[in-house]
Image: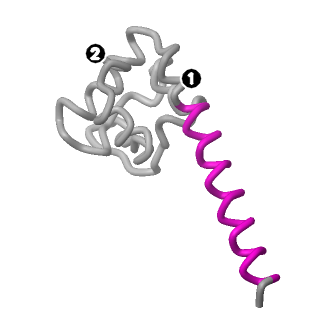
Amino acid sequence: IIYELGRKFYKKIQITSSLKNIDQNRIKNLSTLSIDEKYVLSKFFDNETTEYAFDAKNISVQTLVQKELLVRTSRIKDNKTIFLIDLNVYQLLRQSPKYIY
């Protein structure tokens, strides 16, 4: 029983530390955004939504997808691809809008 509890506790610590690393990487990515990338992210907050349609060829959007801040969907609206903002990023930007404004 003690072994199982120790193992579960160790797993929880590993998950927590890996989430902190992910958040640190995202914070680093957010602090190095270009003006155009900030503009793209601000669209989510201006419209108070977690999904928004952009031109998939937009370099700023592609960069944000590469940085894992946005996720591309297969849905199309008005000849534009719908992108989702990562929920952790969305919450982080809600708490600290200094990264985009």
Residue drawn 31% across and 44% down?
A: 51
> Residue 43 placed where, x, y %?
26, 28
Residue 79 vertical position relative to residue 34 in the rendered view, above or below: below
Where, quadrant-wise, is the C terminus in this rendering? top left
In this view, the residue farthest toward the left is 47
Q: Nearer the viewer, residue 11 or 6?
A: 6
- Mark 2 surroundings: few (<14), some (14-19) or many (≥20) residues within 10 A: few
CA distance separating discs 1 and 2: 16 Å
Which residue matches tag 2? 101
Q: Is the image coloured rainbow, by chain, by secondary structure, or in one colour? A: one colour
User: Would residue 2 appear left or right of 25 to someone viewing this image?
Assistant: right
Q: Nearer the viewer, residue 27 or 46?
A: 27
Query: Is 54 within the magenta?
Result: no
- Mark 1 surroundings: few (<14), some (14-19) or many (≥20) residues within 10 A: few
Query: What's the residue type where badge 2 is placed?
Result: Tyr
In this view, the residue farthest toward the front is 2
Occupied quadrant, residue 58: top left
Which is the main secondary structure of the residues drawn in magenta? helix
In this view, the residue farthest toward the bottom is 1
Residue drawn 71% across and 57% down?
A: 14
Reading the chain from its start, which is encountered first: label 1 or label 2? 1
> Residue 27 placed where, x, y %?
51, 28
Which residue matches tag 1? 28
Q: Secondary structure at mark 2?
A: loop
Residue drawn 36% across and 45% down?
A: 76
Q: Which residues are magenta?
A: 3-26
